[in-house]
Amino acid sequence: MPSPPIRHDPRRHLFEFDLDGCRGTLEYRISSGFLTILHTVVDPALAGRGLGGQLVEAALGYARDAGLEVASACGFASRYLQTRAS
């Protein structure tokens, strides 16, 4: 199954996608040179497809391009980042 396009709305500090009538979002804030991931939410109907990870990867790419460090206040994103670092 192809990945849904992820939209970035910097005004709302949000990455999001829509797929099969469901939505996934990642909310963040930027402060003191850090992009902090606050919440990652993917509709349970889409669970197990790696879509939450795709949202985190989109945020990581944005942070890298903007020269920002990344922090997480989101349990899912924290676990994802730990797994990715292993």
Image: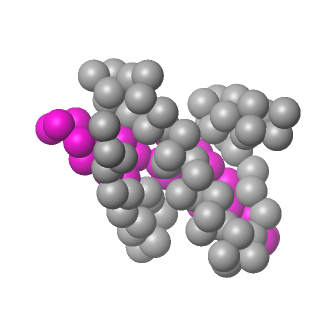
3 left or right of 84?
left
Could you tell me which residue is drawn at 74 percent across and 38 percent down? 84
Residue drawn 32% across and 27% down?
Answer: 46
Q: Is residue 30 above or below residue 43?
A: below
Q: Quadrant of the N terminus?
A: top left
Going by the picture, which residue comes out furthest to the bottom? 66
Residue 54 x/y as whole percent: 50, 46
User: Residue drawn 33% across and 57% down?
Assistant: 5
Q: Main secondary structure of the magenta part?
A: strand
Q: How is the image coloured?
A: one colour
Residue 66 placed where, x, y %? Answer: 67, 77
Magenta highlight range:
16-40
The residue that appears at 58% across and 58% down in the rendered structure is 59
Q: Quadrant of residue 81?
A: top right
Please tell me whether residue 79 is drawn above or below residue 3 in the rendered image.
above
Of residues 84 and 40, the one nearer the viewer is: 84
Q: Residue furthest right?
A: 86
Question: Is residue 30 depicted above or below 38 in this figure?
Answer: below
- Asked if residue 31 shows in the view, the reply is no
